[in-house]
Image (cartoon, rainbow, N blue to C red):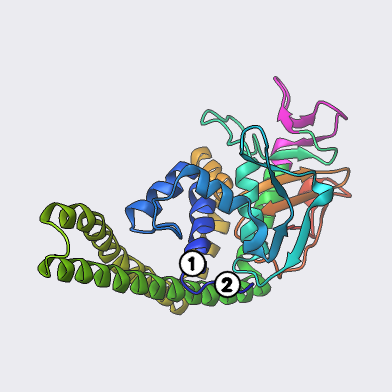
Amino acid sequence: MIPDPDEAPVRVLVHELFAEHGKIKRVARILNERGYRTRRGAAFTDTTIARLLEDPTAKGVHRVNYTRTDDRKGAWVHKPESEWVYQSVPAIISDELWDRCASRQKQIAPGRGAVHLFAGFAYCACGQKMYVWANSPKYICSACRNKIPVDDLEEVFRAQLSQFLLSPSEIAAHAQAASEAVREKEALVQSVEADLKKASGESDKLYALYMADGITKEEFARAHRPVVERRSQLEDELPRLEAELDFLKIGIVSREAALSDARDLASRWGSLPFPEKRQIIETITDRVVIGKGEVDITLLYTPSAIPAGKATHAQGFIAATSWKRAG
């Protein structure tokens, strides 16, 4: 099996949109509005998006022998996992993007009324979520009573954020990721151009058939309407993609300006209002795991090639000097 040059860029887009929006219905709606269609030319549905997100073929692991037909209903059902067979195939998305989508599928979004910065993101090393109890200045695990002061956890995160934004290895990894994003966007532009050319060809064939009295006016109108609609959608989508591609290329050139903004964010963290801090945490954080003497911070959008470190607190969390970031 090899990636289909027309379908693969769209499948990558499915994962990128879900990583950004976190809602299957929204991903299907965006794809349909932009003129994308399934392999059979149908509109994307919630079921289609869910199936594509769950299929590990995109990350290079193809499943076979994992379904069977239910004799009573004729529906496809999963076999026991012990019978599944996996084959290695070329990947079209990174493990980091796959993990980010899987995390968004499993993660329950914190409520809008969160009153603590890491509510919904703080986990104990034992696996339980940690909360700030009433009249307590600490995040506490109800299962094992592990705890960490609220202010100390914020300081660990701030220091981690500063290192993440300013580390030379982080900068180099993101430059590489930006170049890869440009290549993926170029592939998507080419795919849309091919679809647009195909839609235009279908329109021309239908018109020629109508002019040769091969179909009636009513048949022509019925067959031509969806083709015109999709061509219009693709004509709108192509300049949008080209603009995004230009933006990505400009972004690579403007990396120094972005680094300046990053430094500014790290230095301003202490003066930011609570809602802005919370929004940043919700945007870039997967989870924060508090152990006995260490904090593991998993950030979204983190290049997978970067080695991990650990945040220790031999003399209290504020004294942390080295870090671990998984992902």
Left or right of 196 on screen, residue 277:
right
Pinpoint residue 91: horizontal percent, then vertical percent: 64, 69
Check residue 138 for magenta coloring: yes
Disc 1 versus disc 2: distance between alpha carbons?
8 Å
Return the x and y of residue 141 as percentages of the image width and height.
80, 30
What element does badge 1 sit on? loop
Residue 9 in view of the camera? yes
Q: Residue 72 vs residue 123: left or right?
A: left
Name the foreground residue: 59 vs 139: 59
Q: Which residue is mark 2?
A: 3
Residue at x 51% of width, y 48% of height: 48
Give the residue type at disc 1: Glu
> Looking at the image, do the residues carrying marks 1 and 2 touch, with CB atoms under 8 Å apart?
yes
Q: Which quadrant of the rendered structure holds the N terminus?
A: bottom right
Is residue 284 visible from the viewing direction of this image? Answer: no
> Is 169 one of the magenta-colored residues?
no
Judging depth in this view, the residue of 112 and 54 nearest the camera is 54
The furthest residue to the front: 214
Query: Which quadrant does the C terminus fall into?
Result: bottom right
Residue 96 horizontal side relative to residue 239, left or right? right
- The image shows residue 76, relative to residue 14, as above or below, that is above
The local crowd at label 2, few if under 14, some if 14 to 19, many if 20 or more residues have their Cα within 10 Å, is: some
Magenta range: 129-152
Q: Residues within 10 Å of mark 1 (few under 14, many from 20)?
A: some
Name of the residue lying farthest toward the bottom:
253
Residue at (82, 50) in percent of width and height: 83
User: Percent from the top left, x then y, of residue 180?
Assistant: 55, 75
**Residue 256 spot, x, y in % from top left:** 49, 75
